[in-house]
Amino acid sequence: MASGGGPGGVVRDAAAADDAPADSGAGDEPLRPGSTPLRVDLTLETDDLDPPLAGWLDVQLARLATLAGVAAGDVGLVVVDDAQMTGLHERYRGEATTTDVLSFDLGDDDAAGPGEPTSAQGDIVLCLDEARRQAAARGHDVRLELLLYSLHGLLHLLGEDDVDPNAAARMHAREDAILTEAGFGPIYAPAPAPATTPAVTHNKRATPRAGDAPDDPGAD
């Protein structure tokens, strides 16, 4: 999913709970909608950042989840490095490369009924190394890049997908809309800077001479 075009993906297989990269509730009895408010737990398999991810990334994803309409569930955020992500990516997606985010959907397939809150349950694995590369290329903070990955993973847990260009465009537009509503502004596709119009001075000729070219609007 990365803002630079990484593959990412969701693993919709509850059996993956046995190999979940962190103890975030994976393998517990599936959550029943409405049984508990939304809980987001963060596990760092890497060194923390400065300013820290701990106490920020989990809190901010919970805020974004509320804006996305999620009111219940148990979501684990796990931050790993390239080597760990490559292992997971190969095991679950068959690709021996790193990627930005993988979602492990551990919920049941039943949609919330009338009056029941929207629920999310699963693990979202984020690659810190990829976030650093993308953040450097795009000129924003690493924490914001990881927040984008977290939201992308959450939307996968809610059933959204980016399997074709149109679906991807809709998903990324929703991500940026939620991030903007939360006060971060668009992160996946930031609005372009307004174009500046250079001052133009025209050469004024009352009577062009034979063979003169027409005035060039960009000429001095």
Image (cartoon, rainbow, N blue to C red):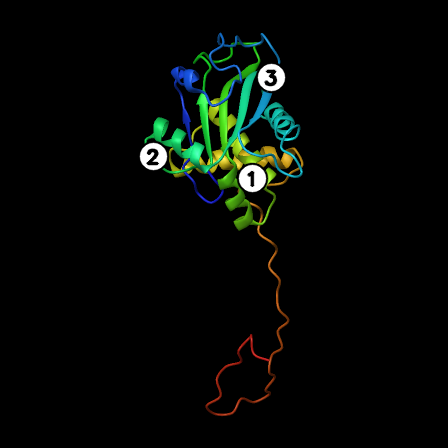
Q: Residues within 10 Å of mark 2 (few under 14, many from 20)?
A: some
Left or right, 30 with reference to 87: right
Q: Position of residue 71 (x, y in %)?
A: 60, 17
Q: Residues within 10 Å of mark 3 (few under 14, many from 20)?
A: many
Residue at the spot of label 2: 95
Q: Residue at x 34, y 34 (%)?
A: 95
Pair 3/2: label in front: 2
Q: Secondary structure at mark 1?
A: helix
Residue at the spot of label 3: 38
Dividing the image into 4 quarters, which one contains the N terminus?
A: top left
Q: Residue at x 60, y 17 (%)?
A: 38
Viewer-proximal residue, 150 or 47? 47
Q: Quadrant of residue 98?
A: top left
Q: Residues within 10 Å of mark 1 (few under 14, many from 20)?
A: many
Q: Position of residue 196 (x, y in %)?
A: 62, 62
Q: Secondary structure at mark 2?
A: loop
Residue at the spot of label 1: 145
Q: Residue at x 53, y 43 (%)?
A: 132
Q: Amino acid at mark 3?
A: Leu
Return the disc, 1 or 3, that comes first in the chain's sequence: 3
Marks 1 and 2, how far apart in space?
22 Å
Q: Quadrant of residue 84?
A: top left
Q: Amino acid at mark 1?
A: Glu
Q: Amino acid at mark 2?
A: Glu
